Image (cartoon, coloured by chain):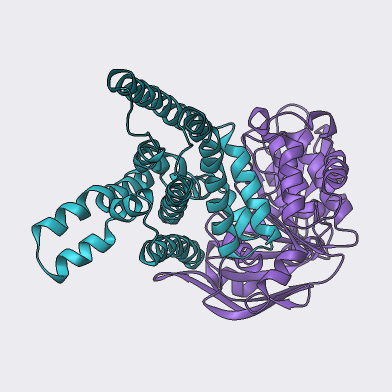
Chain colours: A cyan, B purple
Amino acid sequence: MRNIWTIAKREYNHYFISPIAYVVAFIILITLGIYFASIIGFYSRQALLSGGAQAPDITPINWLFVFLLVFTTPAITMRSLSDEARTGTLELLLTAPIRDYELVIGKWLGGFLFILSILAVTLIYPIILNSLVTPGIDQQLMMSSYLGVILAAAAFLALGVGISAIFTNQIAAFFSIFGLFFTLWFMMGLFSQLVQGSGAQFFEYLNISGHFTALNSGSFNLTDLVYFISLIALGLFTGTTAVEVRRWR
Amino acid sequence: MIQVNGLTKDYGARRAIDNLTFDAEQGEIVGFLGPNGAGKTTTMRVLTGYMPPTEGTATVAGYDIIEESLEVRKRVGYLPETVPLYNDMTALEYLKFMADLRRIPDAEARAYETLEGVNLKDRANSYIGTFSKGMRQRIGLAQALIHRPEVLILDEPTIGLDPAQVVEIRNVIREIGKDRTVLLSTHILTEAQQICDRVLIINKGKIVTEDTPENLQARLVGAQRVVLRVRGDSDGLTGKISKVKGVHTVDAKPDGSVEFEFGAGEDARPQVAKAVIQAGYDLLEMRPIGMSLEEIFLELTRDNAAGKKAS
């Protein structure tokens, strides 16, 4: 556990000196800010015109956050293990007294904490919303929505770190990670409409946006939880295996 | 401290090291000498737990490298050939990170102490990315030393350094080697000669020979070679020298000097000197030339027949 924390701490600190991480944080925060302002504007106009409106909630903001993660987490995780292999520092970590899975989990945790830090900044939105809406926003919906964001972010980062471990070139890692996320987010829903029966069910089960949307609309289901935890486990397992394979060749 | 038994490592169909057997005692500096691609780095990577061997066993500091890899890694300091540094960290941050990975209680104090040991304390807060090659090598060495390991494995520790830095690093290694086991690889023979207690010559994955640097040299020098220089023209000198009893061969060199060889045990130098002076030449210099380690090394690694002759 202490080894994981040592690795995670270094990874987390690394993001604060990495230009890519700043660009990612900037893109996410500016997009969400503009979107939030327009939502507030839209609902207040409605309230003024019709003397009352449906209360806005946080789910569109959180949906956009996760949508942006599809594009930004590949950039954040692409170098996590591939760059260690390229610069030779992987040799340092693999001859240090830590286990391979501790290294991979530490890398994942560092990136996850970085995304959580960005997410923490966006907590200002539900606070503002809560003050604008009477009698306050739906707490249960908000909890479920944030659980969805956290699980999706954890899954994206685990898969990203796992795939990064396979490559030495970070560009190759980026496109592989992005390709996977694109398939899971956009293509699975499409496939499930193209086929019938259990095939459709299968693709629907793999559809990451489906599972997130379920949580983001307040319906907490064990299947969604199992799905995301499976993705996290798969990502970390892939990463650990890839590191072990590196030792053998 | 290090015991290697029948160690073999294949990369696919290529055999990188072939049935290596050797050991190293505590307080011994063992040099691993060989041309590029001989299997030095592979051996070190196996011993440090970076990669498992295909066959064979080894124990380092009393622990099996396969079964107890983590225990071995705790007790070994390793400086890989490409010094593994994070350019975006300061020297102090980097060493503190390594100390944390090694679970050293007061990581920051130890990091400072180690920086002092490699003469980098004044650059503690500079980014490693701004360091010169020599400083990078030293911070790499600091990383290998931070947990005071029982065994130190250094892959080409002086490569790419300027002569002053080479001397400095060699002194550091010699100091460490007093009470710890050091295994270092090099292809610079004078280096092996200067700092190692024992040299293993490795070629094509096999140990060709193993001995102290002095013995290696003595063992291979059967005949004595002497270079001789006179003032002015040395024409006709070779004829005079070759007549002296005991002289086997005489060569006139293009620079005007003359080299001659005589058998061990029959020192022909006084006679040669007399002959030269009687012939009317002004003798300026007469100096024995030992076979250098370079020549021994080439001799041993040229082909396997030479290796067998030597061992």
Residue placed at 52% from the left, 66% from the top? B204
Q: How many marks?
A: 0
Residue extending farthest to the front is: A51
Whole-percent x and y of residue B12?
Answer: 40, 69
Q: Is residue A24 visible?
A: yes
| Res. A99 image quadrant | bottom right
Which of the pair B52/B217 is nearer the observer?
B52
Question: Position of B308 compared to A245: left or right?
Answer: right
Which of the pair B57/B242 is nearer the observer?
B57
| Res. B165 image quadrant | top right
Quadrant including the N terminus of chain A: bottom right
Whole-percent x and y of residue B295?
Answer: 65, 54
Q: Is residue B290 visible?
A: no
Whole-percent x and y of residue B262?
Answer: 75, 58
Residue placed at 50% from the left, 61% from the top? A243
Whole-percent x and y of residue A209?
Answer: 30, 50
Question: Position of B290 compared to A73: left or right?
Answer: right
Residue placed at 15% from the left, 68% from the top? A199
| Res. B130 image quadrant | top right
Question: Position of B54 compared to B87: left or right?
Answer: left
Question: Position of B27 compared to B213: left or right?
Answer: right
| For residue A124, above or below residue B199 | above
Which of the pair B120/B3 is nearer the observer?
B120
| For residue B293, above or below residue A116 | below
